[in-house]
Amino acid sequence: MTRPVPAVFGSVFHAEMPVIAYQDGTWQPTVWQSADELKLAPGAHSLHYGSECFEGLKAFRQADGKIVLFRPEANIARMQQSARILNLPVPDSKQFLDALVELVRRAANEIPDAPASLYLRPTLIGTDPVIGKAGAPSDTALLYILASPVGDYFQAGSPVKLLVETEHIRCAPHMGRVKCGGNYASAMPWVLKAKAEYGAAQVLFCPGGDVQETGASNFALIHNRTIITKPLTDEFLHGVTRDSVLKVAAGLGYAVDERNFTVDELKAAVQDGAEAILTGTAAVISPVTSFIIGGEEIAVSATEQGNAIRKAVTDIQFGLAEDRYGWLTAVC
């Protein structure tokens, strides 16, 4: 059976979605409704004061036909962290996981074969219809989950040029580890400027020379069989894929060096033959092909190691390699 893959990533959705409301101080039973629309008061807290966060994870059709979720508990934990920081009601772990599993079961026939997958987008929003609560959290909320069949976001050989930005930051430093729409919106002016002026795919934010992340992905160097990446701080998103890549790379014999490093170090490493990668749910790993630093374009000479690590991760996802880490949740 051939399952069509939408041409535009995340543009087509399964017909149903689970919706869980938080009311009267407790999470209500999960209800199922059409994914075509969501009823929301125009004065909803999330629309006016940004009380929202989301997650991104995938379900895969494995080589033997089984359907699995990849690391759902990690994404649930990260949304719970985001909710606490935003003073939103914290989702219940079991109810959240049950809703994810049931959604994947209902959408199972729509999950494409490898290398495509089913992308899942849990979203948590504050719903108090009160525009006078600028200085107070929402007492009510909705958690809903969209499911979207997607193709392989990774295209080997496609150039990923990054503009290194040392003056501006992606988002407020204390909000970096929250996966919320405002962080992506705040990065947009610099991303669009980089595309228009340099043809860059993304911006690598390095305020004051401190290498952090791009507008939508975590960042790492691979130099002399060592992966160098920023340690977990409040300033950037604690990526589930980042964590997966580091663990798999360590299992392949790479050293992992989580530390702060500068643009000068980045430039010197690339000129010495280092690879550079972006990590995220959509592509797992995207090799960086060049940097623009101070108006100068510096090419990255190799991508082989990043591609090999990516394959090691996707082999687990698609059932072509042993799940040594207990990351897969069987669905059906």
Image (spheres, rainbow, N blue to C red):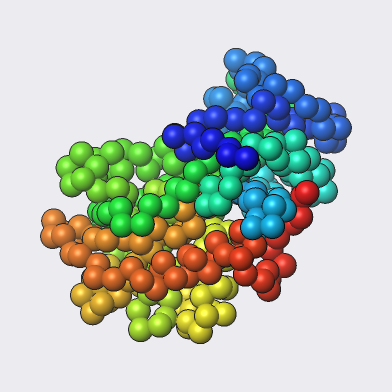
Say which of 27 and 223 sits in front: 223
The picture places residue 169, in percent across and down from the top left corner, at 36, 51
Residue at screen point 85% across, 35% down: 26
The picture places residue 252, in percent across and down from the top left corner, at 52, 80
Specify the quadrant of the image occupied by residue 287.
Answer: bottom left
Total marks placed: 0
- Relative vertical location of residue 282 with respect to residue 124 in this rendering, above or below: below
In the image, farthest residue toward the left: 296
Residue at screen point 76% across, 55% down: 330
In the image, farthest residue toward the front: 1
Residue at screen point 52% across, 63% down: 242
Say which of 278 and 233 sits in front: 278
The picture places residue 207, in percent across and down from the top left corner, at 32, 58
The picture places residue 31, in percent across and down from the top left corner, at 81, 28
Q: Is residue 128 visible?
A: no
Quarter of the image that includes the N terminus: top right
Q: Is residue 298 visible?
A: yes
Q: Is residue 32 left or right of residue 240?
A: right
Q: Is residue 184 left or right of residue 33?
A: left
In the image, farthest residue toward the top: 42
Specify the quadrant of the image occupied by residue 52.
Answer: top right
Residue at screen point 66% across, 44% down: 83
Say which of 299 and 163 sits in front: 299
